Image (cartoon, rainbow, N blue to C red):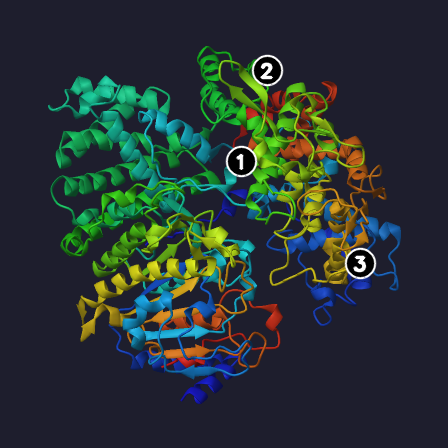
């Protein structure tokens, strides 16, 4: 049997040499003087030994070095009672660590496979990404990107005369991170088997007497097809399924296959096998982004116009966009400026639903992850109802408004106090899309927003403006709060982690395996204080200090997202603080409640940059590297210069070298 | 013998691995080598309630401190277990194993068969995948199941390694077409042969493209290539055994392939489950696989099985019985049936299908006995003991003894309560299973830190032959 697993890393190890001399000269003496007393193999304080640590940032050592970096940077270590290094010594070691970490963030290098996953995107140095510009962008290598299920589901049934009941062979990773990353997915036997079943179904529909396609139908007619009919059918099938004409070589090869299959099983089986084979072409199931033409002086090639058209289509929609395909065929997608113009045209959308480019709204769904509220089971609160589907729809109406206005989109979403309550945009017969009041049978749904049971729905008042301090932005909306809560309680840790990673650009290590941290049960004690009991121990606090001080501000709400003044009979303490970001304007800020926290964050340029990084990942389908520095800065500038237009920002991203070019191997170093 | 063996195990966990190994090697040599071994894991969605399966006349103290080990026969089976009553002499009921490390809400997914924190998803190798690796068949592992969702497959129970989840096929007709085509006649058989052409052509085709790529992208396509190569390779083997596949192929009602999501009419979920057991039996009898996992209530909802009251064979009111609602509905009635009783009836209907599977295997002679003699059924829930489980007590019901490899049959075992001396976890049971098929290892999954004072290594000594 062949080897079943493959190693991701093989292609990704073109890493610059480790500075061993610097390690021996600067780092080793430092560790010996200040660290190994407690962190040697014998003592292993905090279960950490630095004895014999290797200077290379690979195979698990990466996390240790990042921990050391953080402890030194924020002066957590050595402990106050112990001998302290001079600032210059500390700085020298930090410089060495950062230098080595930066090497792992260059394009074409990768310390560990996990760094290709979206939740590890923040491992790339923020200061470097938004610091000095580079001479040019170093994009990703040529790549294959397995179709996400939404694309497959949108395109395949159409091919097969609107066939239904196709098996789902394409998995999507669970979890709260961006779903569609090119590194995360491949087709293996588990996927190929159902795809084969689907392809057979579609092939049968294409050749059936009911098929609208005469040339394909002819293959499976009562009499075997003529040579000419076969040639025509292959041509048609390629255009229809692959989206291009077959080459002469393909004509010949697929023709021969058809012949062989017909000999085995008769001409009808042969016809179906031919179409099945075309439907399972890697080119059909993978997005091909290989690039074409002569490499430029940096060894980069541009995506072919056809590849560009598909890349743009799937960046904005779940199906090929005719306008992009036409532009490509007409030679109108050859330059960045042409791409920008095409994208600008496509992004223009005055509709209430903002559904012309579904992937745009989808970004906000995946970024904030509020639709997950539907998956968090809760019993109805006393005197109320819990309707996560309505909460999600209501929040989404606000998001649609922000996208339509397209002004200061991020700041708006982080601070708006205007929310809909059971009122959404819907298509009304003969009247088009309108704001529609939901059915009042969901009474007393409005209590989720602290509106009284007597409150009457009135469309004219929507969206409602909530009092200052009560709500501020998506994170204070019951949908987001419910999505980031437990079955019975708030989840300040997850909320804090979300802010740490999605707005502050920080990282939080995985929960150590085997830790079964439970917040102790106790009546009369606020959840905040119970959480403190669970996470105050030094080994817990090391990570929880990054999350809890942010997340506890949301104790202002109960786990249904209702504003609360008291918890467990005690007044709510919703104070919190921001620290350990390394950003002057943020570190040390104390806030009294979530609204204040969101106001501070919404004003921060750093937060905006972190948002830019996340959107980059979503639209590129990969994590940024230091090679994308210019792309990120340009996109941020486009956002800023346009007064916070998300469309201007996306246009900049999609017309960037990161999006349109591919770096050929062995030439990435200049 | 047991005591001695326990000492060995203890010694093994302290580092005397050599001794332990000798013990097992001897044991293996003593066992007839050629005896087949098969395992069926039947995973019930959303809880097997311990009290609900408790046989009449056996006390059920709250937190026992001693191991209870007694015969099972002579005690009437509870309502849900009645369909299995004819096999009481082959049955072993195990109570008191904990699985706290897996703890989640409504279901533990992969962690139920993997013993690790539920949120880690496909974190490593689950026990069914491990057994499949040891008992390799043409299809090493077949995952079948039913769900109330109109999906044809899901990945939520079995994984062969970290991130390598294996599918659970939820459509019995599709599963049938997948596994028994080689046994068909006429056009269906010709199509099977055309498939062989097709898979070879595709493998060749992917190779061409692969040549243009480097590195990780080349590897990515490598998995696609391997898929076709391995399917093509299997086609050859299947073709060679077409007669026995034809003889063993079940009759599957095409209607079971039409899955609709309904809350007002027949869900057909039990007919689908029956068909999946038929597929499982057929696949084992044909010699296609030795390990099958059947999941009742798999899918993203993962809260067990919902159905109409009439589908439970009950007379009286009809209405929808939603699995989540009954989980919370201790004091409510659903179509005239109290919530907890609904659970018992649903499990009973599921076990009726399992009983048919057992009869199928018993009807096939093998060696001195029947196929069932060399088969072990492991019945558990992916949600331990309840709807919102705490996993202190994870009930298991085993039928068969894996061809005499385990000391099972007519036994009721209840281990001391969580944390007490002698307490054991589900990982220990899984170690018994994997060691019984010759894998020498002493730990499985992730240990429970809450039991740091107890030795969590090694198999259940009581099951050793």
**B100 relative position to B95: left or right:** right
Nearest to the observer: residue A512 or residue B352 = B352
Protein chain holding label 1: A
Q: Is residue A259 above or below residue A82?
A: above
Q: Residue B266 is drawn in which quadrant? A: top left
Residue B144 spot, x, y in % from top left: 34, 53
In contact (CB < 8 Å): disc 2 and disc 1: no
Protein chain holding label 2: A
Residue at the extreme front: B316
Residue at the extreme top: A330
Label 2 Cα crowd, 10 Å radius (few <14 / some 14-19 / many 20+): few
Q: Of circles 2 and 3, which is in front? A: 2
- Is there any visible trace of residue B78 in the rendered image? yes
Residue B454 spot, x, y in % from top left: 58, 77
Residue A336 spot, x, y in % from top left: 58, 17
> Where is mark 2, residue-wise?
A348
Q: Is residue A467 above or below residue A648?
A: below
- The secondary element bearing badge 1 is classed as loop
Confirm whether circles 2 and 1 share one chain: yes
**A306 relative position to A158: left or right:** right
Q: Of circles 2 and 1, which is in front? A: 2
> Where is mark 3, residue-wise?
A30
Q: Residue B417 is drawn in which quadrant? A: bottom right
Instruction: Name the residue: 27% across, 35% down.
Output: A200
């Amino acid at each position: 049997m062949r080897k079943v697993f493959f190693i991701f890393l093989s292609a990704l190890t073109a890493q610059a040499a480790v500075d061993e001399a610097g390690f021996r000269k600067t780092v080793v003496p430092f560790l010996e003087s200040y660290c190994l007393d407690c962190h040697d193999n014998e003592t292993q304080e905090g279960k950490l030994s630095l004895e014999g640590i290797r200077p290379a940032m690979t195979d698990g050592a990466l996390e240790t070095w990042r921990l050391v970096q953080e402890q030194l940077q924020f002066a957590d270590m050595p402990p106050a009672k112990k001998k302290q290094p001079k600032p210059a010594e500390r700085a020298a070691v930090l410089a060495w660590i950062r230098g080595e970490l930066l090497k792992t963030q260059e394009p074409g290098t990768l310390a560990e496979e996990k760094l290709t996953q979206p939740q590890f995107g923040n491992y790339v140095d923020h200061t470097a990404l938004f610091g000095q510009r580079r001479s040019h962008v170093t994009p990703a290598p040529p790549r294959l990107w397995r179709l996400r299920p939404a694309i497959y589901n949108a395109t395949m049934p159409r091919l097969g005369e609107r066939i239904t009941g196709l098996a789902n062979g394409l998995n999507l990773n669970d979890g709260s991170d961006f779903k569609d990353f090119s590194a995360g997915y491949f087709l293996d036997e588990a996927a190929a088997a159902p795809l084969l079943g689907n392809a057979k179904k579609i092939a049968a529909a294409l050749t059936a007497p009911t098929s609208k396609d005469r040339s394909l139908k002819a293959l499976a007619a009562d009499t075997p097809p003529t040579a000419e009919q076969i040639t025509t059918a292959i041509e048609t099938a390629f255009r229809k399924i692959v989206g291009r004409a077959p080459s002469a070589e393909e004509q010949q090869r697929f023709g021969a296959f058809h012949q062989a299959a017909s000999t085995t099983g008769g001409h009808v089986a042969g016809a179906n096998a031919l179409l099945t084979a075309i439907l399972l072409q890697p080119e059909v199931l993978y997005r091909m982004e290989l690039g074409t033409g002569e490499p430029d002086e940096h060894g980069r090639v541009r995506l072919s116009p056809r590849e560009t058209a598909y890349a743009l289509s799937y960046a904005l929609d779940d199906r090929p966009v005719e306008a992009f395909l036409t532009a490509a065929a007409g030679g109108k997608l050859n330059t960045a400026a042409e791409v920008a113009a095409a994208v600008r045209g496509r992004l223009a959308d005055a509709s209430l639903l903002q559904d012309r480019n579904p992937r745009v709204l989808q970004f906000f769904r995946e970024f904030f992850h509020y639709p997950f509220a539907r998956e968090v089971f809760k019993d109805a609160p006393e005197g109320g109802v819990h309707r996560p589907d309505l909460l999600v729809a209501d929040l989404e109406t606000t998001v649609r408004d922000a996208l339509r206005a397209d002004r200061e989109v991020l700041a708006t979403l982080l601070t708006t106090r205007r929310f809909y309550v059971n009122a959404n945009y819907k298509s009304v017969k003969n009247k088009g899309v309108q704001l529609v009041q939901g059915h009042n049978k969901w009474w007393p749904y409005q209590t989720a927003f602290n509106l009284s049971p007597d409150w009457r729905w009135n469309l004219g008042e929507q969206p409602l403006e909530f009092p200052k301090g009560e709500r501020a932005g998506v994170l204070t909306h019951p949908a987001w709060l419910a999505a980031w809560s437990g079955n019975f309680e708030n989840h300040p840790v997850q909320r804090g982690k979300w802010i740490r990673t999605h707005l502050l650009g920080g990282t939080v290590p995985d929960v150590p395996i085997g830790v079964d941290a439970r917040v102790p049960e106790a009546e009369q004690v606020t959840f905040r204080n119970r959480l403190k009991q669970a996470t105050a121990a030094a080994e817990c606090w090391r990570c929880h200090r990054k999350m809890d001080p942010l997340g506890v501000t949301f104790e202002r709400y109960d786990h249904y997202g209702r504003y609360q003044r008291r918890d467990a009979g005690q007044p709510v303490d919703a104070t919190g603080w921001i620290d350990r970001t390394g950003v002057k304007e943020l570190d040390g800020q104390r806030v009294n409640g979530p609204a204040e926290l969101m106001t501070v964050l919404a004003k921060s340029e750093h937060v905006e940059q972190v948002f830019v990084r996340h959107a980059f990942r979503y639209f590129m389908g990969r994590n940024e590297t230091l090679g994308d520095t210019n792309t990120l800065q340009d996109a941020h500038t486009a956002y800023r210069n346009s007064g916070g237009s998300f469309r201007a920002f996306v246009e900049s991203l999609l017309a960037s070298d990161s999006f349109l070019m591919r770096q050929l191997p062995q030439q990435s170093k200049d | 013998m047991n005591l001695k063996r326990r000492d060995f195990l203890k010694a093994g966990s302290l580092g005397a691995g050599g001794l332990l190994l000798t013990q097992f090697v001897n044991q293996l040599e003593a066992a007839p080598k050629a005896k087949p071994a098969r395992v069926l894991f039947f995973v019930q969605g959303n809880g097997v309630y311990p009290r609900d399966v408790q046989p009449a006349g056996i006390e059920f103290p709250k937190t026992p401190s001693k191991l209870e080990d007694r015969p099972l026969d002579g005690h009437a089976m509870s309502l849900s277990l009645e369909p299995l009553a004819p096999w009481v002499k082959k049955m072993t009921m195990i109570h008191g194993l904990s699985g706290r490390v897996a703890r989640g809400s409504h279901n533990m997914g992969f962690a139920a068969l993997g013993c690790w924190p539920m949120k880690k998803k496909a974190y490593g190798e689950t026990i069914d995948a491990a057994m499949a690796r040891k008992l390799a068949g043409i299809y090493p592992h077949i995952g079948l199941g039913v769900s109330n969702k109109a999906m044809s497959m899901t990945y939520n129970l079995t994984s062969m390694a970290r991130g390598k989840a294996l599918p659970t096929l939820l459509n019995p007709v599709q599963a049938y077409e997948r596994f028994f085509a080689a046994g068909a006649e006429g056009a269906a058989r010709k199509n099977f042969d055309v498939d062989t052409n097709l898979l070879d052509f595709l493998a060749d085709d992917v190779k061409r493209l692969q040549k243009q790529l480097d590195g990780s992208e080349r590897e990515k396509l490598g998995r696609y290539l391997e898929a076709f190569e391995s399917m093509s390779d299997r086609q050859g083997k299947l073709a060679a055994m077409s007669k026995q596949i034809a003889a063993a192929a079940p009759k599957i009602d095409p209607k079971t392939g039409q899955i609709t999501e309904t809350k007002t009419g027949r869900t057909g979920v039990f007919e689908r489950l029956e068909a999946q057991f038929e597929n499982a039996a057929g696949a084992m009898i044909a010699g296609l696989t030795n390990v099958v996992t059947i999941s009742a209530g798999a899918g993203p909802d993962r809260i067990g099985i919902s159905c109409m009251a009439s589908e439970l064979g009950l007379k009286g009111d009809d209405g929808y019985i939603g699995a989540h609602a009954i989980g919370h509905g201790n004091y409510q009635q659903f179509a005239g049936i109290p919530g907890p009783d609904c659970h018992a009836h649903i499990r009973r209907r599921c076990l009726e299908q399992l009983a048919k599977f057992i009869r199928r295997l018993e009807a096939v002679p093998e060696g001195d006995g029947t196929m069932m003699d060399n088969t072990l059924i492991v019945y558990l829930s992916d949600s331990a003991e309840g709807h919102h489980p705490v996993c202190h007590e994870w009930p298991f019901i085993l039928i068969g003894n894996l061809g005499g490899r385990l000391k099972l049959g007519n036994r009721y075992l209840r281990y001391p309560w969580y944390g007490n001396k002698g307490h054991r976890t589900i990982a220990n049971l899984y170690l018994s299973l994997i060691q019984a098929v010759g894998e020498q290892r002493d730990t499985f999954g992730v240990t429970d830190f809450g039991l740091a004072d107890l030795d969590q290594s090694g198999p259940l000594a009581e099951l050793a032959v």
